[in-house]
Image (cartoon, coloured by chain):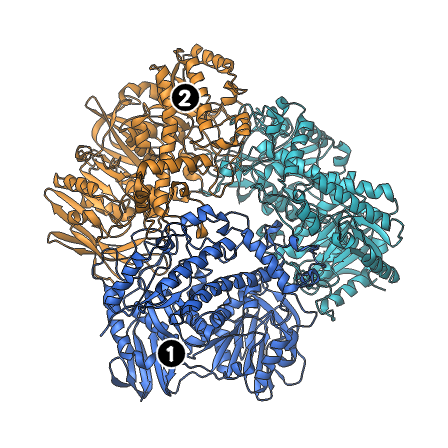
Chain colours: A blue, B orange, C cyan
Amino acid sequence: MWGFLYVRMAEFAWSIFEPIEGTFEFDLFDRAIQLAKKYDLKVIIGTPTATPPAWLTDKYPEVLNVSREGVRYNHGSRRHYNYNSEIYRTFSKRIVLEMVEHYKSNSTVVGWQIDNEINCEMNVFYSNADHDSFRQWVKNKYQTLEGLNDAWGGTVFWNQTYTDWKQIYLTRPTVTHSYNPHQLLDEKRFISDSAISFVQMQANIIRSITDKQWVTTNGMFGHLDNHRMTKEVLDFYAYDSYPNFNKVIEDKSMMPLHDRKWSMNLSTVRSFGGGNFAIFEQQAGPGGWVNRLEQPTPRPGQLRLWTYQSIAHGADLVLYFRWRTATKGSEIYWHGINDYHNLPNRRITELKQTSEEIHKIGNTIFHSEYISDAAILTDYPNEWDGEEDNWYGHFIKESKEAWFKAFQYHHIPVDFVNITQEMSLETLAKYRILVYPPHPAILTETTAHLLTRYVEQGGTIIFGARTGYKDLTGQTYMKAFPGYIKDLVGVTVEEYTLLNGWQENPDVNLLNKQFKTTGFNEVLQPEVENVEVMGTYLNAHYEGKPALTKRSVSTGTAYYYGSVFNYQTASILLEDMEATNYQHLFILTPDIELAVRKKDGVSIYLLLNYSYQSQHIQLKAEMENLLDNQTCSGSITLTGYDVLVLKEK
Amino acid sequence: MWGFLYVRMAEFAWSIFEPIEGTFEFDLFDRAIQLAKKYDLKVIIGTPTATPPAWLTDKYPEVLNVSREGVRYNHGSRRHYNYNSEIYRTFSKRIVLEMVEHYKSNSTVVGWQIDNEINCEMNVFYSNADHDSFRQWVKNKYQTLEGLNDAWGGTVFWNQTYTDWKQIYLTRPTVTHSYNPHQLLDEKRFISDSAISFVQMQANIIRSITDKQWVTTNGMFGHLDNHRMTKEVLDFYAYDSYPNFNKVIEDKSMMPLHDRKWSMNLSTVRSFGGGNFAIFEQQAGPGGWVNRLEQPTPRPGQLRLWTYQSIAHGADLVLYFRWRTATKGSEIYWHGINDYHNLPNRRITELKQTSEEIHKIGNTIFHSEYISDAAILTDYPNEWDGEEDNWYGHFIKESKEAWFKAFQYHHIPVDFVNITQEMSLETLAKYRILVYPPHPAILTETTAHLLTRYVEQGGTIIFGARTGYKDLTGQTYMKAFPGYIKDLVGVTVEEYTLLNGWQENPDVNLLNKQFKTTGFNEVLQPEVENVEVMGTYLNAHYEGKPALTKRSVSTGTAYYYGSVFNYQTASILLEDMEATNYQHLFILTPDIELAVRKKDGVSIYLLLNYSYQSQHIQLKAEMENLLDNQTCSGSITLTGYDVLVLKEK
Amino acid sequence: MWGFLYVRMAEFAWSIFEPIEGTFEFDLFDRAIQLAKKYDLKVIIGTPTATPPAWLTDKYPEVLNVSREGVRYNHGSRRHYNYNSEIYRTFSKRIVLEMVEHYKSNSTVVGWQIDNEINCEMNVFYSNADHDSFRQWVKNKYQTLEGLNDAWGGTVFWNQTYTDWKQIYLTRPTVTHSYNPHQLLDEKRFISDSAISFVQMQANIIRSITDKQWVTTNGMFGHLDNHRMTKEVLDFYAYDSYPNFNKVIEDKSMMPLHDRKWSMNLSTVRSFGGGNFAIFEQQAGPGGWVNRLEQPTPRPGQLRLWTYQSIAHGADLVLYFRWRTATKGSEIYWHGINDYHNLPNRRITELKQTSEEIHKIGNTIFHSEYISDAAILTDYPNEWDGEEDNWYGHFIKESKEAWFKAFQYHHIPVDFVNITQEMSLETLAKYRILVYPPHPAILTETTAHLLTRYVEQGGTIIFGARTGYKDLTGQTYMKAFPGYIKDLVGVTVEEYTLLNGWQENPDVNLLNKQFKTTGFNEVLQPEVENVEVMGTYLNAHYEGKPALTKRSVSTGTAYYYGSVFNYQTASILLEDMEATNYQHLFILTPDIELAVRKKDGVSIYLLLNYSYQSQHIQLKAEMENLLDNQTCSGSITLTGYDVLVLKEK
């Protein structure tokens, strides 16, 4: 048995539903849904707000988004609208209302995707509606101009004191393209709030009309608090997974992780709602637009592999993008399962096999839980503040990818956890190890207190350079570094320097191995007795001074590293922290990803070979291969891109 | 005997002729023409529409061109006007009318150059007049909005359905700078039509007043159907030849062909009117503007060589740019024959020698015919559509240059032929070999039919990757590749992949030699019996599968190569096709270009040495050296940049 | 004894002084100045015009600067105003008037800094006020449109004739971004005049109210005739010295000179007023904004070294930037002496030592004179015209740095001298050697006459390629190169070529050593008998022809080199010219800078080690070490970044 169960449609079809302002038509999609029903397919409908009709943008150009420099983005691409135009909200409400009213009782329609890929393509907004809305947002947040001036550093720097609310705008072009960093951080908070409120507005309409159809949206893009949106607005999150983006050279940063970058993304998505999710667009062929994002074709086996990758990380529903390759428009190279010609091809054959397998193991694997006892902490304030701050921002991405790669290549399942000011110790306490390497410049007393209690109750935590010197406005504390966690790690930063490539980067000796440091160096100074110096600088004027420290606190441990992490340094630290790596069950190669899932007390092990080459591995215990129901153990060879789904016997 | 015969003037002199709106003065140029007459010089006058006067642009800024983002281009450079402003057309008509009326009976004035270098510097236009005019152009072309929506893919992609003509614009800024590709293709057709109609307007005025003075324009720039313009509007085409542009590093793409790039350009110009042409600006010294295009000085011998290069390819008239180096403005480094100081220099000496030679051989060589039995096919739809399409566009330039270089270095004279939907078999049948390597993504049933008949009557043709998958709107066919020529070449494309540099490019074995492929790989699948596999892929997941095929059709042959050409692959294919290389007459080095011209049944051979080094060559037959009237044969040495003009005895 | 004597304040504090339009408050700074007085600190107040209040820019946006493309620079950074807005001038006058009236009798306040870093960040201006003001400036300069058209080459090039003053603007966007070069040169003169008149306006107010407080401004930025401003407006010039900018990779051009670039800057500042100056911002820690200019931390010893560097070149007052590192805004990484935490750090310790030393030697060293008998000539017309002219502009920077490095590394103290049309022979005659390597394309008959008299009275001068072919409008002479200095150097330029990297650069033999030439080659032709050929080209088509000549004129000597200088060529020429290098007193390594100062007939020698490494040097005479009052001679070791201040015994 195999085949499709769901079909998603209509996400850009506003002018089909409302060809003329105020006139609604449903015929085309009624027929399509009828046809879906005939083949026992369930239908997911997208609200079409990502692409307003030409008649709307032409008549009301104020609904369009605008660049910071004031250039309006026009009709002809997608996502050219802004979230804050009252007119756009009014039109959006009406089209959603009409569609939901029409389909609320249609049992083939099971759920709604709101808009499409919120904040994709562009995640800054400078229309007049956005400026006005931001002014109001700031007023709500700070209440008084004094509060605002305080938060933005106004009275003391470059004369940025505001004396009337009407002087407030989102950032506008300035000399040297340098903007008030505190204002920029608020700007991103505002964009996230705007996007969420736009989605919320649509969700409210749907829920007010039906409780039989679920509500979600798809994506994962910048300047959006997906955690909050998932919890407050959605029934579950839907992700669009395109691993071959890693072969688009324009984003070279993806290269170190290759396809594992998507394991990282999927792990992040898992953290949004704290559990499983859906894939609304799983890559089904070469991707790319006419003028950008050119991807090679997936190799034989990769479509199947990537499907298992999604499932391994928590996808309980996988839809492919798309059925047939479009013959028109900017996305003619975004290939579907079928080519333009609709004739047989190898991708169809491969997805048929995949589908058969999934039908077979679905009951065992779906709705299971991803098992891990280590987590990487992330948070939005540092991500957003770091975008503009060259003194720590890019270290976040670098260290996060380094740590994830180290976890992956050592077969240590890991979660992402988004840390907030409201977080409870309970959420953290389930992890043995926490890494907060994204260099949390912004770290409050509240967070420091939480992490201290985490360590005191037995946890292990590690911090990297630039930790703890800023507050939630992005202003620096008048404190020795690392601010409020000084007492936890037991060190202060004696001095520091950015490494800007002008001279050779200093080396460190860490746990008796030698590495080159990058990005930043902090010279550490132990402040209490039980601080163990685990690494020292080997050159520069701070030669011999501490670079890595470790301190026992009650039954827990706190590490501090005064530089930026890479794969090698993360790897030896994982060893020192004795992270859970399943060596009692498997001997694996780095090209294999191990995911462990549990359901009804039974553990399922997914082994995914991301290499074009065969991999030779060892099973130390007898297991059942769920795909062929054979027992296996000992030496096993996984061919290129192959997958094993094992159950402990 | 030597000396100049023609002088060209006035192409930017509008404010001399019309210093005040509506007031016309001719004194300065009357005196100049009088002086020309005294020295027996014929005069060519340029209409001055390339540089409107300050009083005009200041009073009517709507005549100016505007960037896509809305930034207006102002007075101070050149070509800052748009073709579609009614006001500009009115002023242009009047100045042309006044000038032609004034000079129509002046026998010293032999012809008119319309404007100057149409579409040079900038070949996109976004003024309001252009948007309005495009709206009308689209209306004329499609008649109905349904027709437009069909052609632009509107109803099915990103909600781009238009419901009122007033919603139509030329492309405007969009999110991600991705524009509707079908609209973009029409935009370029529109620009070409606008430019031609502007030139036509002036030509009509001139021809309505005089039939004794010819009409042309000069240049060769983008977004302009020069073939159509030459046939419909001009008496002949005039080209501006600056070979030292190949030493301006900003366009590195010229490097592989060096000075031969200009042989390619001249061959292209020859195709415009299907015969000889004029050179209005032949490089006479170092070139460059104050802030760009910096060229070194031509080396001794190069000015003479380049003059012969122009003549070899069909120039019956050569004017140098320019008499004396300007001392003012942006072009003070665009050197004339004379330097600022007007004192003797080596360039004058060299052009004196050249002039003496040309006077001597002119009767023999001018009005002769360029002889070739091979042609490279080109067409505007693919060139314009390919500009934005990264999935084939840059392969056009790459393969075209590779083939031209292969023809050149193997001393095989070659023509360019612009293929249209109206072309007759007769035009093609005169060639033994056709290469259509510019990867004609757009290929209609009509063209497929024409090319099939060409092969059936005995021709040889070769296609490269990406052939035949699009129609004239730029939409893809719902067909197996290569579309309508599938039956001619006898193969389909089983699968394909773009090569984007992410991993090592696959190798192919072609005719028993091994090459690395670039750009794109198509895996070919023979569909009929008589398809010969001439090359296979040597690695990747399609290792061993066909990459090059050859099929006999009646007395003709059709090749298909699933990748992009380079000099090496083109060279071995030329060998396989047994192209005419004149080895019975000459043994030449690659640095020598061979051009064969015929007049009154007599063949003239021009041998041009593009190298700074001497070249040792062999003449297998006795020939007459037209420059010194000596007989020559056997071993001959051409010194650096030297030229031989030979006549078979 | 040690400690601070001065404090500078208020330069961005407009909204503190005038929180509401027309309402003035002085309380905060009154208290600050009171506190300064308590600690015996003198106060320097900055006028706050670099950052207008939000209420001002919001109400009168016409005071803001605008990009050439018309994008307005808004509130939120600094220096976003324009100099020519009448409204801004009115507000500026009032705030300055109010502040000076308030503090005129306060004896703690010793002087005024006008605005802050004039022309920093942005030195082009295109607001409407600037366009209008430029129109008036041009009218004043040329009186008639004929004069203007002549100067800008209007009637002969690209139809740029102006027939009404209202057609005149500063450069506006044009096709190809090529602007009229003569207009551009005037545009820069206009910007300089605008800036100076804005500073003058403020200085006039201050001087009309008080004669007890001096007037200066700080900086050194582009498009500003600092020499004229210093002489006409200021009591002395104040410079902001940040040597660690040389470690900001974004300006790689600083690398060849490293910290010595700042010796060059300081030497330039010394030339503004022809003597000593102040440092208002001496680097006191790592520097950088949030999103740019990232500098590493200064190494131990460098803050002290750089203080001595400033003093060695003429600083009689050194203020550090800044007291404490800011915790808010774009400059949180521009570290002060104190860190955010105000706890002890090594920079405080180092500056304490430095301060003690300066207190000790101050009387001896301050108000002394920098001694040199060689000078590098510079001028504004060539600097500004060369900005846009790729055919000589970048050679200026390249050769100037090469010569300065050669002087520095050979321990030859050198001055910069700004040459003007009004300069007297007397000013130049005090130098034995002049180098005018910044390739003075613009060179008038007046200047040629002055330099000829300089040589005739015994001076030695050297010119580089591109000398003398333009007049003060930037138009070329109709003369053989090098124009008006042809008779002085005794050569003309036979031919020339730009070297644009397309082929290997030719070599020259200079004084029996072989070098590769860069940038430009001029082939020289001796025109009189006593021209000595000192170097020839070794390849290219001008192989064997002269590249360097030398000619005796009376008791003087004139060199001409037909290419661009580098460190090596400048070094051997210095040797040939027998420049004063103090080898009778010292044997030094290149890493040591030698500065010689004289006061009351006594010579002081400062030896500065810019290397991290120790340097071994020799003193050939007995000297007194002023820092420890010991006598020293013979072999001495300077540790990394150390400094010696010696007095001849």
Q: Nearer the viewer, residue A129 or B241?
A: A129
Amino acid under label 1?
A: Leu
Image spot of residue C78 (x, y percent): 67, 51
Q: In this rendering, does residue C373 appear at all? A: no
**Tag 2 subunit:** B
Amino acid under label 2?
A: Lys
Image spot of residue C69 (x, y percent): 56, 41
Q: Nearer the viewer, residue C277 or C75?
A: C75
Residue at label 1? A594
**Tag 1 subunit:** A
Q: Classify mark 1: residues with Cα within 10 Å, few (<14), some (14-19) or many (20+).
A: many
From the viewer's perspective, tell me whether residue A536 is left or right of residue B1: right
Closer to the eye: label 2 or 1: 1
Q: Residue C493 lies in what quarter of the image?
A: top right
Q: Nearer the viewer, residue C339 or B150?
A: B150
Label 2 and label 1: CA atoms lie apart by 80 Å
Q: Secondary structure at mark 2?
A: helix
Q: In this rendering, do the residues under marks 2 and 1 share a single chain?
A: no
Residue at label 2? B352
Q: Nearer the viewer, residue B584 or B545?
A: B545
User: Looking at the image, how many numbered discs can be counted on the residues?
Assistant: 2
